[in-house]
Image (cartoon, helix red, strand yellow):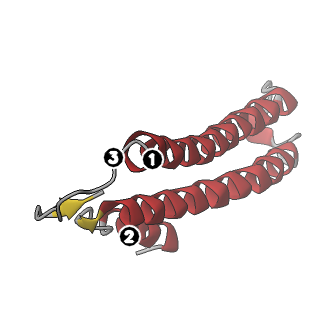
Amino acid sequence: MSSAERRIDSLGDIPFAGEIAADIVLYSKANQQLARDMASELDISSERARLAILKLKGHPRLAGVNVRARSFLVAYRLKRARDLCRGLSAEVVKFSLQYRREFIEASPPKKDPYKGEVDL
């Protein structure tokens, strides 16, 4: 199992029981770090892929293929994926802040001790 698969599986292992606010923060931080790392890798890979594809120019099997245009398209797709990962990272932060705003700060002070299975 690769490192990425382990990290994605670890997101599913975060229990949402007991102290939910702490679990939300942990989940958000893990998601944000994964998205940042993916964006960084895609950013590096886009340029590497473009340069590697450009080296194929003049290959006999690619006669008639515009290698420069195709390398640009591959790099463009990887950069779009990078931007999506950056957006995911930002949205996870917004998710955590929204949870805090809606549930933690909006909660009235406790009068009686809550005896349910989960707590805000």
Q: How many marks?
A: 3
Give SS at disc 1.
loop
Q: How far separated are the C-alphas under marks 1 and 2? A: 29 Å
Tell me which residue sits at (80%, 24%) in the image. Answer: 64
Which mark is first along the chain, 2 or 3?
2
Tell me which residue sits at (11%, 65%) in the image. Answer: 115
Q: Is residue 99 above or below residue 64?
A: below
> Residue 16's spot in the image, x, y percent?
26, 62
Disc number placed over residue 47 in the picture, else none: none
Residue pointed to by mark 3: 108
In front: 68, or 94? 94
Give SS at disc 3.
loop
* In this rendering, the label closer to the viewer, 1 or 2: 1
In front: 28, or 45? 28
Q: Is residue 78 left or right of residue 30?
A: right
Disc number placed over residue 105 in the picture, else none: 1
Give SS at disc 2.
helix
